[in-house]
Amino acid sequence: MPNQRKWVGGVRTLSPSAEGWAGSATEALPAKVTVEFANGDTGFLDMRSARAAHWAHRIDKLQRAKQPVYVEIDNETGVITNVRVPRRFKVESIEAGSRGPSFVVVQDAPEP
């Protein structure tokens, strides 16, 4: 979407922190969680949405594991509208196709 900013990188903090709401029933979750990213940018998760609540748990796990996260944030509202988990791969080889495109052979990269 054109009115969104995208970020791939680390998470600095979640506020309120997950210790206060992780494992809580849906009705006990905070109304919103603010996510601060390593670049200083912030985004918000509306915890009334089941999808956003799932993303909050996922982002918390990635932060604890010091793993990056990919997010899209609406420029007007600051709401996080998409979350993905980037995967690292090691390129094993690049092979020319017999009739066209090349093939890239990858293997999962070991965790850092």
Image (spheres, grey):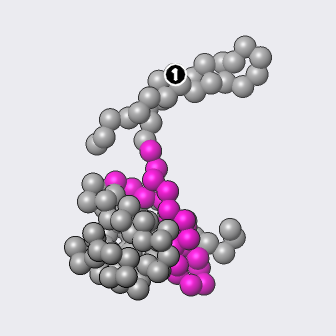
* Residue for point 44% across, 44% down: 87
The secondary element bearing badge 1 is classed as: strand
Judge whether 87 appears above or below 72 on screen: above
Residue under the point 36% across and 65% down = 57
- Name the quadrant containing residue 62: bottom left
Residue lying at the far left of the rendered structure: 19
Q: In the picture shown, does residue 106 fall above or below 45?
A: above
Q: Residue at x 32, y 82 (%)?
A: 28
76 up-or-down from 21: above or below: below
Instruction: Describe residue 94's horizontal placement relative to residue 96 as left or right.
Output: left
Observer-nearest of 42 and 23:
23
Structural crowding at the residue carrying mark 1, measured as other residues with C-alpha within 10 Å and reported as few (<14), some (14–19) or many (≥20) = few
Q: How many marks?
A: 1
Residue at the far right: name it.
Answer: 99
Position of residue 21 in the picture relative to residue 97 (left or right):
left
Q: Which residues are magenta?
A: 67-87
The residue where tag 1 is placed is 93
Q: Residue 19 location in percent, x, y?
A: 22, 73
For the C terminus, the image quarter is: top left
Say if the magenta span includes residue 89: no
x, y (%) of residue 110? Answer: 32, 35
Is residue 41 visible to us here? no
For the residue marked with disc 1, what is the amino acid? Ser
Q: Outermost residue toward the top?
A: 98
- Whole-percent x, y for residue 10 in the image: 36, 61
Say if the magenta span includes residue 77. yes
Work out whether residue 105 can be spotted. yes
